[in-house]
Amino acid sequence: MSLKGFHIFFIVIAILLAAGCAAWGFVNSMAPAFGIICSGIAAALLLYGIFFLKKTRKLIL
């Protein structure tokens, strides 16, 4: 697996983990702030993943 492929895989896993933590935070009535923070992190990782794919599209690795 190339470094680019591993990076994309790692970003996807991090997005899924943040989304899962956000869902847990919203379901658990004691931690709504945690759900909001994790949702923001998941959104930021998604934007970073899109940026990374656009940036590396022209690279031949």
Image: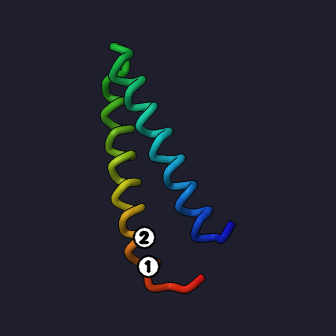
Identify the image quadrant of the C terminus.
Answer: bottom right
Q: Position of residue 40 (x, y in %)?
A: 32, 44
- Residue 39: which quarter of the image? top left
Task: Classify residue 54 as left or right of residue 3.
Answer: left
Q: Give the residue displayed 56% in from the left and 56% down from the top.
A: 9
Q: Secondary structure at mark 2?
A: helix
- Amino acid type of the residue tagged 1 in the rendering: Arg
- Which residue corresponds to mark 2? 53
Instruction: Give the number of the disc on residue 57.
Output: 1
- Amino acid type of the residue tagged 2 in the rendering: Leu
- 14 or 29, nearer to the observer: 14
Measured Cα–Cα span from mark 2 to mark 1: 6 Å
Residue at the far right: name it. 1
Q: Give the residue displayed 51% in from the left and 47% down from the top.
A: 14
Residue at the far top: name it. 29
- Reply above or below: 5 against 43: below
